[in-house]
Amino acid sequence: MARILVSTYMVRYPLGGMLSWALQYALGFHRLGHEVFLLERASYTDACFDPQRQQMTDDCRTGYAIVHDLLERFGLEQRLVFEDINGDVFGMNKTELSELFRSADLLVDTGNHGAWLEQAKEAGIPSVLIEGEPGFTQIRMEQEAENGQVSNEFDYYYSNGANIGTQNTTAPNAGRDWHHVFNPVDTELFQMSVPPADAHFTTVMNWQSHKPICYKGQCYGQKDVEFAHFMDLPKHVTVSLEVAAAGKVPKQELQSSGWRLRQAHQVTHSFDEYRRYINASMGEFSVSKNVFVATRNGWFSDRSAAYLASGRPVVLQDTGFSDHLPCGEGLFAVANVDEAAQALEEIVGDYSRHARRAREIAESYLDARMLMQGVANHVGL
């Protein structure tokens, strides 16, 4: 058994989708028998979203309480450490925190951008970066190098983009040796169930999660860019399509095109509500971020993994993940409206078969315990 420190992103944005994404990594190591601690640090002002007041703030106590309560279900509530912008530490005192690093075997950074890297180096423990924004991350690293900035240096580099570092993507490798791991899903946490009779195909998305990024004369955008290619999809299918979106959403255009709309925060205000929303769905249709599609970097969604584990078939815009995951039954990789419409109609034509296959794909390719075992083996734990 190893002591693994997972540097993550939960307290700062304690909504269902983010909590679910981060939890899968921790549970993967935890279910393998490792001693897992979750570490997080606010490195700038107004870093924490308060879901009760719907605003960003320096006061992170609400987020800490939400994450603490969620981790209590798994016996991990005493292993949550958070440092706020003032340097105040929640979960243990600073002496205990220093001892934690001295006794740890590995630091895995999944979403805190090297915030604890200095402590890991001082303690002499190896560090792993698992980055979830393939293409964007490598371009940013390249730009930092061009500008003379020093990027964080980890001992091992992993990407959620299965094509990063290969000839199958146009994304740069930023001079790193990239290994690959899909966003994991805990298949004990998401269980297969029968959807309600009035279920829709749904998704949860941020219309624009960050600004476009430009590299070598090309600018890469977000899901808003790609959704435009599928705006008319509801007019080509007999199934009902719903999108729960956050950000500057073109509500009138979506509704006039036949989309059902929900506000993303309504269906993700807690981890349980997020899981209920997936269970209340027939399946998922979603686009991918423009940078993922344009560079064909092989990214696959943590949210889609949760749909699959719940026995909900997924139709997802292809990023190159079809090179690595079985598609055509339970999971469909699509490039345009015609392919998406055909996939959706095929699913409803034999729903039980596609639902079973969805679950099988999650178990065989995306299970958190299996994927984190691969990481642990690679770093020598």
Image (cartoon, helix red, strand yellow):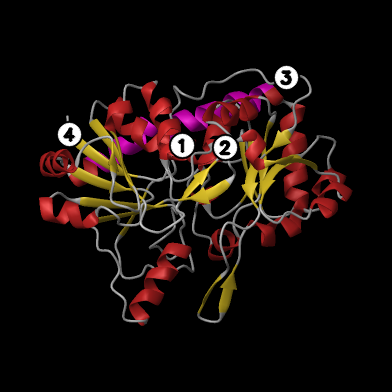
3D distance between C-alphas at marks 4 and 1:
30 Å
Report helix, strand or loop for mark 2. Answer: loop
Identify which residue, 292 or 140, lies in the foreground.
Answer: 140
3D distance between C-alphas at marks 4 and 3:
42 Å
Q: Position of residue 374 (x, y in %)?
A: 29, 40
The residue that mark 2 highlights is 52
Q: Position of residue 206 (x, y in %)?
A: 62, 51
The residue that mark 4 highlights is 2
Q: Is residue 33 above or below residue 230?
A: above
Residue 62: give its label: 1
Q: Position of residue 282 (x, y in %)?
A: 70, 28
Q: Which residues are magenta?
A: 352-376
Q: Quick check: 84 left or right of 359? A: left
Q: Earlier in the sequence, mark 2 or mark 4?
A: 4
The amino acid type of the residue labelled 1 equals Thr
Residue 141: give its label: none
Identify which residue, 78 or 18, lies in the foreground.
Answer: 78
Q: Closer to us: mark 3 or mark 2?
A: 2
Q: Quick check: 42 left or right of 320? A: left
Q: Earlier in the sequence, mark 4 or mark 1?
A: 4
The residue that mark 3 highlights is 196
The amino acid type of the residue labelled 3 equals Pro
Q: Crowding at label 1, few (<14), some or many (≥20) Cα neighbours within 10 Å? A: some
Report helix, strand or loop for mark 1. Answer: helix
Q: Are marks 1 and 2 in contact (CB under 8 Å)?
A: yes
Q: Closer to us: mark 4 or mark 1?
A: 1
Q: Earlier in the sequence, mark 3 or mark 1?
A: 1
